[in-house]
Image: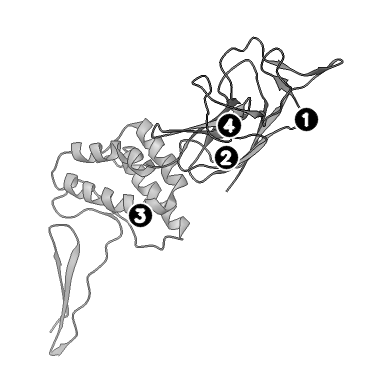
Amino acid sequence: MRNTTILTLAATGVLVTGALVAGCKKKGPEGPVVMEGWQQLEGWKGSCYFPPDYKDSDRMAANEVRNAMMSQWKGERGDGVEFSTGVIESVETVLLGKPDAVKSVARTNLEQCKKYMAGGSLDPWKSWFAGLESGLTTGDCKWAPLRYQQHDYLDLGKGWQFEGRVCAGDVVTIEVSSNDYYRLGDGEPWINGEGDTSRRAVGDEYPCTLEDCFHGTVIYRFTGEDGTIDIGAVGLEKEFVARQHGILELRVNADDSWYDNVWRKKGSLIDHAGISYVGRE
């Protein structure tokens, strides 16, 4: 009796059985046949890409899968599928930075493709793709983590200043030079970033009235991405740990009357306090 192979396809397009008849000698049933690469099943108007089951550490395989999907998204396969160029570029950028996400994206993309190729509308696939970037970047920091040093000089003529963009988990050491002195009014003592430690900050004119916030102390304000605001003392040095993504700023703890704020002058030299953000993980 001639050997005969019988193959059956499920509605989803996955090969589910494989039986072999060979005379009177029987063999055990074969397992499901795995489909990989571009496949066009009976009744489909085009092909879908079936991603291989590769290891997450296999970056070469991830690149191949990403490139295969992109060829279809760009309309290069002539099957009626073509998405917005701008969205494709954004998704590509995200996937380049997140190769571990390629596998799950490819699986969902395959399910969308199957429905369309079997006669469905392209709209659900387009809608999923349009929201892919935001779905992949939810919770991500909008800028690079602060892993470097950022320097400037304290300005006595303005309020919140020296914007530092930080990501959740960033550890930032805030430093203010100790040998530069300023005065916040005629007849007041010369002070540095610690402020006038004999004069507690009391009253609505002070941005910070905590126990360690004195008149003229250098203080920080952190505005989180959820809109919450934290204010505290820096003095000459403060280690700040970002609990979420947000903006870090500094100023002196005083009212907004800038006209009588002056730096100490010795001969032709005028003090100017340097301030720094030193970031690390």
Camera-side residue of 194 and 142: 194
Q: Which amino acid does label 4 sit on?
A: Cys
Which residue matches tag 4? 213
Q: Closer to the N terminus: mark 1 or mark 2?
A: 2
The residue shown at (19%, 36%) is 123
Q: Would residue 42 be visible to someone looking at this image?
A: yes
Disc ID at residue 254: none
Query: Between tags 3 and 4, which lies in front?
Result: 4
Mark 3 element type: helix
Camera-side residue of 32 and 77: 32
Which residue matches tag 3? 103
- Label pair 2/3, CB-CB below 8 angstroms: no
Mark 2 element type: loop
The residue shown at (51%, 22%) is 203
Query: Between tags 2 and 3, which lies in front?
Result: 2
- The image quadrant that residue 267 belongs to is top right
**CA separation in Å, label 1 and label 4:** 20 Å
Q: Closer to the N terminus: mark 3 or mark 4?
A: 3
> Where residue 263 sits: x, y (%)?
73, 18
**CA separation in Å, label 3 and label 1:** 56 Å
| Quadrant of the rendering where the N terminus is positioned | bottom left
Q: Closer to the N terminus: mark 1 or mark 4?
A: 1
Mark 1 element type: loop
Camera-side residue of 245 and 24: 245
Q: Give the residue furthest to the top.
A: 259
